[in-house]
């Protein structure tokens, strides 16, 4: 089963995304801060990470940078979910190693399409 980690500190968004992904048949792991996101990435080895930028303890940019520096984790696709939509912020996310950057508020259809696209790219 495909495993997706959601690292999001806003409960409503986290619950909605988790429910939608579980309904599509994905195994979902949720966490609320950057430090526990890294711990879960190392222990669970998800197929995809959905990562908020602004989180307690370690921000999403740093989580992504650390993942991409580790050869064992570097191939896991990262998709940022963020309200931080200035061009410099999006650039920072992409430079950290993300494959996609989705602005909040987002449509679930767009999110699910992005998830499926990234999973397809990594399985090809």
Image: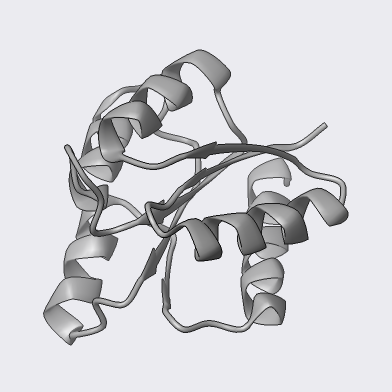
On the rendered structure, is 25 left or right of 51? right
Quarter of the image where one finds residue 23: bottom right
Residue 63 place in picture, x, y as percent: 26, 39
Using the image, determine if residue 105 lies above or below residue 60: below
- The quarter in which the N terminus is drawn is top right
Residue 48 place in picture, x, y as percent: 57, 43
Using the image, determine if residue 72 lies above or below residue 52: above
On the rendered structure, is 77 left or right of 119? left
Residue 29 place in picture, x, y as percent: 60, 35
Quarter of the image where one finds residue 98: bottom left
Between residues 118 and 84, which one lies in front from this camera angle?
A: 84
Q: How is the image coloured?
A: one colour
Residue at horizontal 42%, vertical 27%? 73
On the rendered structure, is 92 left or right of 48? left
Quarter of the image where one finds residue 5: top right
Residue 84 place in picture, x, y as percent: 24, 76
Residue at horizontal 23%, vertical 32%? 66
Figure label count: 0
Between residues 124 and 87, which one lies in front from this camera angle?
A: 87
Residue at horizontal 70%, vertical 72%? 113
Residue at horizontal 18%, vertical 85%? 86
């Amino acid at each position: 089963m495909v495993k997706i980690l959601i690292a999001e500190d806003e409960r409503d968004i986290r619950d909605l995304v988790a429910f939608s992904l579980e309904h599509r048949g994905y195994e979902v792991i949720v966490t609320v801060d950057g430090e526990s996101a890294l711990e879960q990435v190392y222990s669970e080895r998800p197929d995809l990470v959905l990562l908020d930028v602004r989180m307690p303890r370690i921000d999403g940019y740093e989580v992504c940078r650390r993942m991409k520096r580790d050869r064992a984790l570097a191939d896991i696709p990262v998709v940022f979910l963020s309200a931080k939509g200035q061009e410099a912020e999006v650039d920072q996310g992409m430079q950290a190693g993300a494959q996609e950057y989705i602005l909040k508020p987002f449509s679930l259809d767009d999110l699910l399409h992005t998830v499926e696209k990234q999973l397809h790219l990594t399985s090809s």
